[in-house]
Image (cartoon, rainbow, N blue to C red):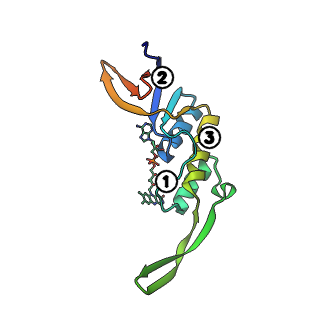
Amino acid sequence: MTQAQRSTEHLIIGGGLAGSMLGLRLASAGKEVTLLEKERGPHHKVCGEFLSREAVDYLLGAGLDPLTLGAVSIRVVRLAVRRTVVEAELPFPALSLSRHALDEALLAHAEHAGCNAHRGAIVENLTPNLNSWEAHLRDLSLIHI
Ligand SMILES: Cc1cc2nc3c(=O)[nH]c(=O)nc-3n(C[C@H](O)[C@H](O)[C@H](O)COP(=O)(O)OP(=O)(O)OC[C@H]3O[C@@H](n4cnc5c(N)ncnc54)[C@H](O)[C@@H]3O)c2cc1C
């Protein structure tokens, strides 16, 4: 069987928040970038889904408004230990948004900027080869970087 091979200037493995933001930045800067995400579509993640003011600013700066994606505001922090519950106002405004929505929106935003994203692409290993790297995918294809 012949292995499918291709090459890319920049390769990102994982289309979570970090990978998609990097893909967005590189594509926006005119770089050729390929992103591989193992999941085939939007999916839930284990996460508190709390967006601090700083995180919201990063997203707004990248052109994504969490409120338009369905984020809700959080104004209080509540601590519960057995039957004792204490509550206090947060010292800053915060938001909450599901990772199902946020990760998908950020990945779609990166794709829109020109990032070449492949879903359902599982990287099995990454190996050095002289001055470059090779990513070996589960479907037996190979990407040279
Ligand atoms: C319990 C918990 C609660 C949290 N609560 C919060 C919170 O409230 N607020 C907050 O800001 N942060 C929170 N975090 C932290 C937040 O989840 C991480 O900072 C964030 O997910 C990191 O993004 P990432 O893109 O590096 O990784 P991830 O979001 O994990 O993305 C990695 C991506 O890589 C893909 N991938 C993995 N292996 C491969 C492979 N071999 N080939 C191809 N793709 C692959 C995965 O499918 C995934 O989409 C929490 C974390 C945990 C564990």
Q: Is mark 1 within 8 Å of ligand 1?
A: yes
In the picture, the disc for residue 8 is 2
Q: In this rendering, is residue 23 above or below 58?
A: above
Calculate the distance from the C-alpha at mark 2 to the C-alpha at mark 3: 20 Å
Q: Residue 118 appears at what percent x and percent y?
A: 54, 32
Q: Residue 25 appears at what percent x and percent y?
A: 54, 38
Residue found farthest to the front = 1
Q: Residue 139 appears at what percent x and percent y?
A: 45, 26
Q: Tell me the kind of residue under disc 2.
A: Thr
Residue under circle 3? 108
Residue under circle 1? 45
Q: Secondary structure at mark 3?
A: helix
Query: Is 39 situated left or right of 67 in this image?
Result: left
Residue visible at 59% across and 59% down? 97
Q: Mark 3 or mark 2, which is nearer the start of the sequence?
A: 2
How packed mark 2 is, by other alpha carbons closer than 10 Å (few <14, some 14-19, many 20 or more), is: some
Query: Is 117 situated left or right of 144 in this image?
Result: right
Which residue is at the front of the view, 60 or 109?
A: 109
| Proximity of marks 1 and 2: CB atoms separated by less than 8 Å | no
Q: Is mark 3 within 8 Å of ligand 1?
A: no
Q: Mark 3 or mark 1, which is nearer the start of the sequence?
A: 1
Q: Nearer the viewer, mark 1 or mark 3?
A: 1
How packed mark 1 is, by other alpha carbons closer than 10 Å (few <14, some 14-19, many 20 or more), is: few
Q: Tell me the kind of residue under disc 1.
A: Lys
In the picture, the disc for residue 61 is none
Residue visible at 32% across and 26% down? 127
Q: Quadrant of residue 40?
A: top right
Q: Residue 145 appears at what percent x and percent y?
A: 42, 23
Calculate the distance from the C-alpha at mark 1 to the C-alpha at mark 3: 17 Å
Q: Tell me the kind of residue under disc 3.
A: Ala
